[in-house]
Amino acid sequence: MELDYIRDLGNSAHLAFFMSKAYGLELLYKLENFVQEGADNGIDDTYDAIEFNRPRKAAFSQFCSSLRDQKAIVYGVSDLKKSKTVLRLSPSALEELALVRQRG
């Protein structure tokens, strides 16, 4: 990855907050992959998918809430299990990620 690409992510309105945690960039890409795969990923599934610099579960949940407040992710209801909350990148975050990639 080039430094300019990372800089563009950090300057993006909806993506910059991902860069505030050591596992944030990995989380960003995991969430993007989950969208592409149509995965039914809840908070626990997403937490388990983090491989590097995994935080404590409570801290991860707080970070997800902060990402939601920043409009970087959205919480939705699972199609498979109505009591499950799934995490998705927000449409704005997906759009900004596509724009950052085009610039690169």
Image: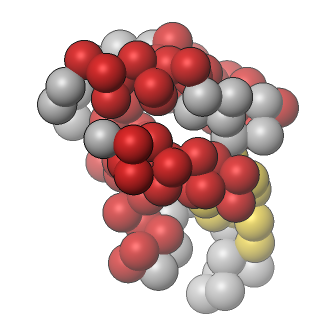
Looking at this view, is 30 or 46 the one in front?
Answer: 30
Judging from the image, the colouring scheme is: secondary structure
Q: If the image is split into quadrants, where does the N terminus sit? A: top left
Residue lying at the far bottom in this picture: please name it: 80
Q: Residue at x 48, y 69 (%)?
A: 35
The C terminus, quarter of image: top left
Position in image of residue 65 (x %, y %): 74, 32
For the question of whether residue 28 can be seen, the reply is yes
Residue at (47%, 80%) from the top-left corner? Answer: 38
The part of the image, by quadrant, that contains residue 21 is top left
Instruction: Give the farthest residue toward the right.
Output: 69
Q: Is residue 68 left or right of residue 58?
A: right
Apparent side of residue 32 relative to residue 18 in the rendered image (left or right): left
74 above or below 10? below
Nearest to the observer: residue 63 or residue 35: 35
User: 19 or 6, which is in the foreground?
Assistant: 6
The residue under the point 70% across, 60% down is 91
Spot occupied by residue 14 in the image (x, y as percentages of width and height): 67, 34
**Left or right: residue 65 compared with residue 30:** right
User: As displayed, is residue 73 above or below residue 22?
Assistant: below
Please give the count of numbered marks on the rendered protein.
0
Q: Position of residue 99 (x, y in %)?
A: 51, 49
Q: Position of residue 92 (x, y in %)?
A: 71, 52
The residue at 58%/46% (across/down) is: 96
Eyeballing the image, is 19 above or below 70? above
